[in-house]
Image (cartoon, grey):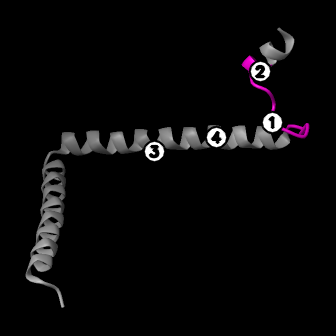
Amino acid sequence: MATGAELLRLLRSEADRVSAIADQLREAVETVGDPVTAEAEMEAVRAAAEQRATVAEARAAAAEQRAAEPTSGGPKPTQQQQRWQHG
C-alpha cells in the first residue's frame, strides 16, 4: 500500500501532467481561433516534414552508395591517415 508521501508525489506528478495537457490545449485553441496563426503553423509543419523527408532521402542514397562500393577488407583510411602514410 502506498504511503501518504508516495500518494502526494503521484498526485503532484499527475497534476503536472494535466497542467501540461491544459497548456497544450490552450495553445491549440488559440491557434485554431486565429486563422493566420493556424495557417502559419500548418506551413511550419509542412516545411518540417519536407526537411525530414529530404534528410531521409539523402541518408538512404548515401547508404545505397556505401552498399554498392566494393569492399577492400576494411574501412577506408581517413585523409589524415593517408597523409601520414604518404607523408
Kindly report which numbered mark, 1 or 4, lies closer to the viewer in this rendering. 1
Instruction: Look at the numbered discs 1 and 4 and tell me whether their residues touch, using CB distance below 8 Å.
Output: no
- The numbered disc on residue 81 is 2
Q: Earlier in the sequence, mark 3 or mark 4?
A: 3
- How far from the left and from the top, in percent, is residue 73? 90, 40
Q: Which quadrant, please, contains the C terminus?
A: top right
- How far from the left and from the top, in percent, is residue 33? 13, 50
Tell me the magenta residue range. 69-81
What residue do we see at 78% from left, 39% from top? 66
| Badge 1 element | loop
Amino acid on which disc 1 is placed: Pro
* Quarter holding residue 11: bottom left
Q: Earlier in the sequence, mark 1 or mark 2?
A: 1
Q: CA distance from mark 1 to mark 3?
A: 34 Å
What residue do we see at 34% from left, 40% from top? 44
Q: CA distance from mark 1 to mark 2?
A: 12 Å
- Residue 78 within the segment the image draws in magenta: yes
Instruction: Look at the numbered discs 3 and 2 and tell me whether their residues touch, using CB distance below 8 Å.
Output: no
Residue that carries the numbered disc 1 in the rendered image: 75
Q: Is residue 87 left or right of residue 42?
A: right
- Residue 59 within the segment the image draws in magenta: no
Kindly report which numbered mark, 4 or 2, lies closer to the viewer in this rendering. 2
Amino acid on which disc 3 is placed: Ala
Q: CA distance from mark 3 to mark 4?
A: 15 Å
Kindly report which numbered mark, 3 or 2, lies closer to the viewer in this rendering. 2
What residue do we see at 41% from left, 38% from top? 47
What residue do we see at 80% from left, 36% from top? 75
Residue that carries the numbered disc 3 in the rendered image: 49
Task: Between residue 32 and residue 64, name the one nearer to us.
Answer: 64
* Quarter holding residue 74: top right
Residue that carries the numbered disc 4 in the rendered image: 59
